[in-house]
Image (cartoon, coloured by chain):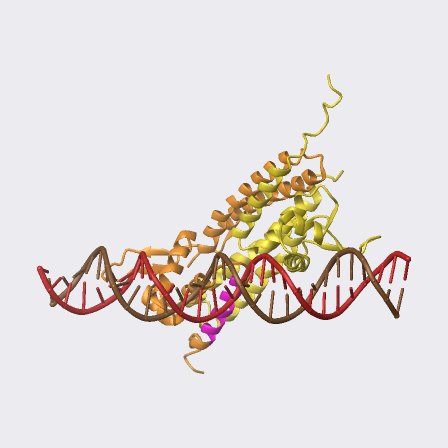
Chain colours: A orange, B yellow, C red, D brown
Amino acid sequence: MSDKVDAVTPRDEDGVRRSVEHMAMMLADMGFPRMPSRVLMTMMSAEDTSLTAGDLAERLGVSAAAISGAVRYLMQMGFLVREPAPGSRRDHYRLPDQPWYGVTTAKRGFYGQFSDEADVVIDAAGGARTLAGERMTDMRDFFRFVEEQVGTALQRWQEQRPPRT
Amino acid sequence: MSDKVDAVTPRDEDGVRRSVEHMAMMLADMGFPRMPSRVLMTMMSAEDTSLTAGDLAERLGVSAAAISGAVRYLMQMGFLVREPAPGSRRDHYRLPDQPWYGVTTAKRGFYGQFSDEADVVIDAAGGARTLAGERMTDMRDFFRFVEEQVGTALQRWQEQRPPRT
DNA sequence: CACGTCGTTCACAAAATTGTGAATACTCAT
DNA sequence: ATGAGTATTCACAATTTTGTGAACGACGTG
């Protein structure tokens, strides 16, 4: 037998690239802006702890300016952190520890805002006993429920998630 | 005392209209297309069981063509059903029973697809013991967890939601 | 302190989205 | 069948988004 039994399959750069673009498109279809999607998935699939803007520009074949915008967007979302460049002049971008968990947590507030605005409509519509009021009330209750459930689910995740290596 | 103690506050048409546009904008910011957002919220806030394309066009001040597109999109999403026009030639559009619950249910599959594509990347990256593989694995596990939790949460909602009048 | 290397910003170009008006195709009642 | 009233489609216009190249600015290094 070869002593390479445990050796990892060599990285298929082209395969990764294609899948990355595919996943980026899925995200884009969900309403996530294109370039940030591509940058995000590129970061996810990189065999490096951090990448510079130049790296990203090269791998995606786009201009530095496009990276600049996408990176700012992702940092704003909490999907990326800028490493204060240790020895180099270049800024290094890195994914935070649990990017998806973090962003999901942050997005939770939306449900609350939406529910609150629903209350405004219910009032303006003449109360919960009108047709419009009923619909809005149903929606509001559902969203409030979701918000709460997401909250407890995220807690549960933190408790039971597989220990990191 | 007046016998109108129980009377609903008169509907504030302008207030409703403004709030509707506001909520539509919130949805749009979340990545939901504009016109469908506006149509959806208009339906939600209507004091009618169903509306015709003409009604919607009038209330939103847009062309029939715009309504046609938005309505098709919403039907596709499961946010709207077309009533087979009882006595009239006009198609009547109506919100299904639990629109938000239904759409949430339908959207659940996305997490699965995304997770599956993640598996492809993990493989192409050389397995879960690579940096890229680790990140992707974490994401995949989180998404699978979310999918499952959303599932049970939705069940719970059906059991405990306030009985309809 | 000047140079070289990056990152950001700006004005503009390209492209995708969104909505309109007119033409076309349906559908039902007569 | 015919015709009035609707819905859909099409080509186009307007807007918005997205990305580029070049100029500008910041910062560490020789």
Q: Residue A94 appears in which quarter of the rendering?
A: bottom left
| In-image side of A148 versus A3 (left or right) | right
Point 73% across, 43% down: residue: B48
State the residue in front, A74 or A124: A124
- In the foreground, B109 or A4: B109
Lateral position of residue A125 relative to residue B165, left or right: left
Quadrant (top left, top right, bottom left, bottom right) of the C terminus of chain B: top right
Main structural element of the magenta stretch: helix, strand or loop?
helix
Q: Residue C25: percent from the left, percent from the top?
A: 75, 69
Q: Is residue B9 above or below residue C27?
A: above
Tell me which residue sits at (62%, 41%) in the image: A140
> Residue B125, position in %: x, y?
44, 72
Question: Furthest-top residue in view?
Answer: B1
| Residue B25: x %, y % from top left | 54, 48
Q: Count of labels shown?
A: 0
Q: Is residue A23 magenta?
A: yes
Of residues A121 and A13, the one nearer the viewer is A121
Q: What is the x, y in percent for residue A117?
A: 57, 40
Residue range of the region highlighted in magenta in the rendering: A15-28
